[in-house]
């Protein structure tokens, strides 16, 4: 089965074609970062309007790259939530309409299920069961995954998501939006010994996270010190080390509590090199297997939506003609 995937939940337009038995045939991602950067964050109305402008040209491009036309597509998958309501509606309307015009089933996909299963786009995919750490701009969750559609959230953030903490701290350091990757780059030059940030909630039992305190700690540290380049890099390094170590400790704990021996990392913060390194070390020490999607599939993309849509459609599931989106939608309410 050949499925066209459409991702428009936030500020990336992602389009892809996935075929069962063959894998990914073509994909493209267009990021709206430049549009939103000047406003210091995503402006929902601008996001929706830009998805409307970009989605069809990108789809035409992807079909051409795969040497296919609409009549070669057997199903359409689009992101149904969670995300920005207007942005979701643009993708859902397009997906639903294409399904109708091409006479094929269409299905709305959970964005986080896309992230969770993105490692299945790689040549060496994980096997069930596994623990997944979902770390993005909006979510920080530990999920017990026993199969497709069998998800239990075993850890969640009580306040900010990890990516949100990266972005807010980056803003305090004058790094613009979204600042996660820029902060990580600055941290590379930082002295790991100069500042020490707390590791939130690690001395309490359980798998929940809390990152808003780190942002406040960063604010106080910035206020109490010189604003030179070296100090900013040292603060970035200390902040990143605290987030990474906290995530690594909780992943280790989740593997221990579930008894599983595979860990999957997904979401934008999964692109962080220090996190990847920390998790590699931990998994090596505890003889667990670690899986990441390739860098471009850590952040939002259409390939993961096409993949999940393909699995669901092959299982005989599809949505009816009504176009529904869920801006808030818990992964375990699938
Ligand atoms: O999954 P994603 O693309 O979008 C959401 O669904 O949220 O994740 C975006 C988040 C942003 O907060 C961004 O700053 C963060 O991922 N991010 C990073 C890095 N690259 C992206 N955070 C830390 N280090 C990175 N290298
Ligand atoms: Zn995402």
Image (cartoon, grey):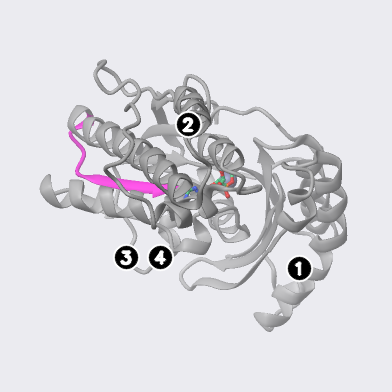
Mark 4 and mark 1: Cα distance apart in space = 22 Å
Q: Secondary structure at mark 4?
A: loop
Which residue carries the number 4 mark? Answer: 122
Image location of residue 295, percent across then percent down: 47, 62
What number is the disc on residue 124? Answer: 3
The earlier-in-sequence mark between 1 and 2 is 1
Whether tag 3 and tag 4 are in contact, CB under 8 A, the answer is yes
Q: Quick one: which residue is furthest to the bottom in this view?
A: 67
Q: In the displayed image of the protein, which residue is found farthest to the front?
A: 226
Quadrant of the drawing holding the N terminus: bottom right
Q: Say if the magenta span includes residue 265.
A: yes
Q: Which residues are magenta?
A: 258-266
Indicate which quadrant contains ligand 2.
top right
Q: Badge 2 local density, few (<14 within 10 Å), some, or many (20+)?
A: many
Mark-to-mark CA distance, 1 and 2: 42 Å
Assign a secondary structure to mark 1.
helix
Q: Which mark is residue 218?
A: 2
**Image quadrant in which the C terminus is located:** top right
Q: Which mark identifies residue 59? A: 1
- The image shows residue 241 at horizontal and vertical percentages of 33, 42
Check the image and report above or below for 169 versus 5. above
Residue 309: give x, y in percent of width and height: 59, 52
Which-is-in-front pick, marks 4 and 2?
2
């Amino acid at each position: 089965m050949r499925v066209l995937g459409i991702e428009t939940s936030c500020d990336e337009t992602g389009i892809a074609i996935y075929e069962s038995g063959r894998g990914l045939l073509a994909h493209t991602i267009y990021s709206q970062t430049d549009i939103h950067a000047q406003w210091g964050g995503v402006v929902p109305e601008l996001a929706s309007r830009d998805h409307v402008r970009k989605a069809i040209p990108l789809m035409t491009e992807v079909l051409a790259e795969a040497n296919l036309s609409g009549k070669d597509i057997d199903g359409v998958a689009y992101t149904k939530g969670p995300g920005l309501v207007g942005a979701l509606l643009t993708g859902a309307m397009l997906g639903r309409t294409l399904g109708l015009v091409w006479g094929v089933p269409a299905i709305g996909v959970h964005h986080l299920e896309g992230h969770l299963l993105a490692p299945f786009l790689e040549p060496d995919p994980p096997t069930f069961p596994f623990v997944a750490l979902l770390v993005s701009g909006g979510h920080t969750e530990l999920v017990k995954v026993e199969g497709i559609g069998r998800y239990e959230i075993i850890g969640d953030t009580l306040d900010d998501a990890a990516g949100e903490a990266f972005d807010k701290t980056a803003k305090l350091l004058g790094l613009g939006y979204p600042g996660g990757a820029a902060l990580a780059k600055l941290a590379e030059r930082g002295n790991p010994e100069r500042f020490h940030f707390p590791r939130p909630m690690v001395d309490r039992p359980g798998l929940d996270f809390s990152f808003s305190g780190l942002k406040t700690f960063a604010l106080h540290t910035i206020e109490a010190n010189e604003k030179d380049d070296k100090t900013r890099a040292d603060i970035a390094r200390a902040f990143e080390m605290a987030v990474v170590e906290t995530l690594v400790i909780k992943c280790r704990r989740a593997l221990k509590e579930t008894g599983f021996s595979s860990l999957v990392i997904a979401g934008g913060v999964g692109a962080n090199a220090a996190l990847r390194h920390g998790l590699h070390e931990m998994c090596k020490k505890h003889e667990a297997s670690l899986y990441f999607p390739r860098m471009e599939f850590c952040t939002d993309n259409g390939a993961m939506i096409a993949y999940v849509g393909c699995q669901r459609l092959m299982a005989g599931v599809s949505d009816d003609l009504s176009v529904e989106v869920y801006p808030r939608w818990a992964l375990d309410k699938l």
